[in-house]
Image: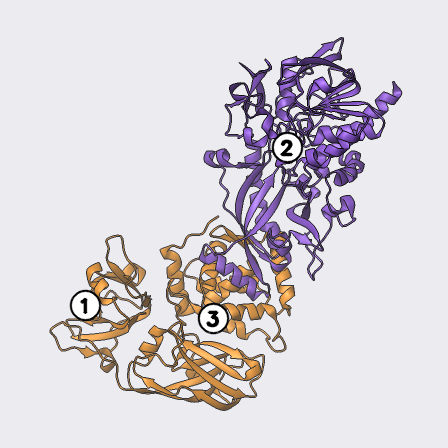
Amino acid sequence: MATGFSRRSFLYGAVVGGFASSFLTYQLLNLDFQGLENNATQQLLFDFINDNSEISPLLGRAYVELDLLEIEATNVNAMAEFVISRLDLQESLTQSQLADAIAEDFRAGNTFEVEDWVFSSTEGQLAALAYLLKGIPDDSVQQVSSTFLDLESLEEAELARLDAWGPDQGQAAQAFNEQPNGNSALWVKLDGLERGGLYYLFFEDTLMQTTTHYSDGLITADLYPGQTALLTYEEGNKTIYLVDILSMKKQFIGDYRVIGNAARPDTDTGDTLIDSYNAEELLRVGNWGPQVGAVGAPFNPQPTGHSALWFQLLDYKGEKYQVYFGSYPMNTHHHIDTDSMTAGLSAEIVKTIVAEKAIIPVHIVDHDRKVRQLIGLYTVR
Amino acid sequence: MLYLEPSSVENPFEYDVAIYGAGPAGITLALALANLGVRVGLFEAGGVDSSMLDDVGAGHPYRAENTGRPYNLAATRARYLGGTSSLWGGWCRPLDSYDFEDRPFIPVSGWPIDRADLDPYYESAINVCEVDTAGLGLAAFEQDFDFDQYSHKLNENLRAKNFLFSPPTRFGERYRQDLERSENIDCILDATLINLSEQSGQIDFSEIASLSGVRYTVQARFHVIAMGAVENARTLLHSELANSSGYVGRCFSDHLGETIGIAILSKESNYYLHNAGTEFSGVRVLPHLGFSDEFLRSNELMNFGLVLEPRQSADTNVNSLIEQTSFLTGRESERTTVLMRMENAPNPQSRVVLTNQKDIYGVPSVRLEWQPSMTDFTGIEKICELLPRQLGIAHGRFKTTYENTQNNRDTASIQGHHMGTTRMSMDSMEGVVDKNLRTHDVENLFVAGSSVFPVFGFANPTLTIVALSQRLANHLHQQIEVR
């Protein structure tokens, strides 16, 4: 059976990104990871989580869709519980044993298909768990859920002795220590980092894509371009924390200093608008997208030729606002039945905007109250 | 002795055994009989090379119509000393035990002999075909020649099925001197069999014609036609012999070749890569990947062998995805295109028939109606359904690209292996010759060559043709001694 990806599956991602991760973290925390640092199942899971390729979205999403059909789409906890119940994360497996376990899936017929390729259930379960943990909003953007952990509630501790870290400052809405893929990267050098921990760096309250090199005592972590722009939009100090989600402890690494403010294009309404961060929040947006696109490529093109943005809303009560893409008002539709909002812009305008690298603010505007709220930044790269 | 024309033959044309056709089957049989002290006449329609018939034109004996699936008969036959060994690529492999079995899902399947009956003759056929087996003999075809750290036995259901290589032996060149020197052989060129005359269930004599217009008759205790699957059928149909079953000319077959998919394999499987597998320890080996006899039997599958060609580029994101998952499980991987060599089911509707046209000797020309059966193509589909799981057990992946469409059925490549038109059978109503290659209907008329194969396996036929000729020589020698 070939697997196509529908709008429904994309909504899974949006919902999962908002709610599932804390539950999954809870599940992971209940596992005894101590002494299992060589566990290949865990390693493959973490590799899936840290890998920036399309493995976990494609494979994981397909597995979720195929294997969890009996579970309500909105019951994310049940989905995650189902996946975890299929995985024996406690079992200590060598890499070779894991490969044999995958082979055994094939022998037993525990397989599923993606684009006519056949995968083992073990691979699917690991990818699905990684997919649920990461919360993949759409095909082009991988966004780590900000509700992954409540950073404030964690106990402060010295997880390891801090030797050095960097970079510790940069310009507003600009990439820092830019990687070939456009991500911004931090590095932290530590002494005495214990194996068996599951470490993540947090930039403010945002979990970074983190890789731990135990042998060097080095932790590296990435932010996607859209995240970088949004998190460094305003000048000031941004906290950097190291968190071990297994011991639920955090260690303050330092402050990243944002120099200057990002330019804020007018929303060109003819009104003087108040930014919502100086007033009340208009809407709670669980997720939105797409957030990244290539130079010259219209985002999310529709059959009409328009480009469209989607917004998954929280506690939506039917308020009506207009979405602005940079200074361009978008044709905005509200869907109270699905707690969502969509907004379209003509192909001609989009073509002009995405003609070169840029970071475009996306706002919603309440014209009656003359308030605008920054939703996020669309990155053209 | 070798005679370029019949007029130079001093002896009367009387032999213990008259063999018509000096290809691998005929030459092997003649030399084996001669070594046993049997007096042999070997009649070859062509000359020492292909030039003799160059100027014949419209009446060319090989002129043939084709009303079935496209088939290039002209390019796959050779009418001169050595026969189609002159066109041979040298591929050698015995048939598998499974090929000899009666399989209910293949109509009229099963040989009246089994693999063990042929094993001693395969051993000598290896020598005749000059196959280097590193001293292993027949065992070399199942031998693990991969001496690095990996075992190529990927799982219990998969097997290496080796092809080994002849130089290739051009039988006309390689054995010409032996034919010339043998006192027991008259090898006569430009000698076309135009009729077999039967009386009271015996061949009384044969009629031979030459391009120069000379015609003469040959008498022998035993007559053996060894002219290839088209000409053997043509001769029996024209002579109205040995066809009480109606099978003469039917079940014409050839091996199909298909590209069936993409595989991504772990390093253990590199053994099966086409470019990597051609030489191990100095022996030319091309391992094919196939299913074990047990697995083929339990799943009612046609026999096949897979060749894996390295593939340069990934086609889809999923390809790279699989490679990365392979990487994540600590295994290097290789992208390959998967080619299948496959046996076909005997199809009575695929046949050689006579036409009203006659060649320069007055013998009716043939029309070929080459029709693979649907069993062949559904067989490919079934194998493609089973491969993902079996390669998955072996830490690999397989995705089929094969579609059983009319266009694909029409364009499947052929190998030029003509087989099946005088099939061997236990029951005289299901074939033309018995287990000793004697025609069911005519006591002293035998057939040699791949036209006697009742089912075909996926191996190239030459080694089996030579083995069957060795076995026939043994049988005829015994018959002569008894008489």
Are labels 2 and 1 assigned to the same chain?
no
Residue indicated by mark 3 = A23
Neighbours of disc 3 within 10 Å: few (<14), some (14-19), many (20+): some
Residue at the (70%, 35%) spot, across then down? B171
Q: Colour of chain B?
A: purple
Q: Which element is circle 2 on?
A: helix
Cα gap from disc 1 to disc 3, whole angstroms: 39 Å
Query: Residue A261, image x and y in percent?
Result: 26, 84
Residue indicated by mark 2 = B84
Query: Residue B53, image x and y in percent?
Result: 58, 24
Query: Residue B310, image x and y in percent?
Result: 55, 54
Question: What amino acid does circle 2 point to?
Answer: Thr
Among the chains, which one is orange? Answer: A
Neighbours of disc 2 within 10 Å: few (<14), some (14-19), many (20+): many
Circles 3 and 2 in contact, beta carbons < 8 Å: no
Residue indicated by mark 1 = A328
Circles 1 and 3 in contact, beta carbons < 8 Å: no
Between circles 1 and 3, the one closer to the viewer is 1
- Residue B165: name its quadrant: top right
Q: Nearer the viewer, residue A36 or A351?
A: A351
Query: Residue A222, image x and y in percent?
Result: 42, 77
Most distant residue in the left direction = A270
Between circles 2 and 1, the one closer to the viewer is 2
- Residue B46: name its quadrant: top right
Between circles 3 and 2, the one closer to the viewer is 2
Q: Which element is circle 1 on?
A: strand
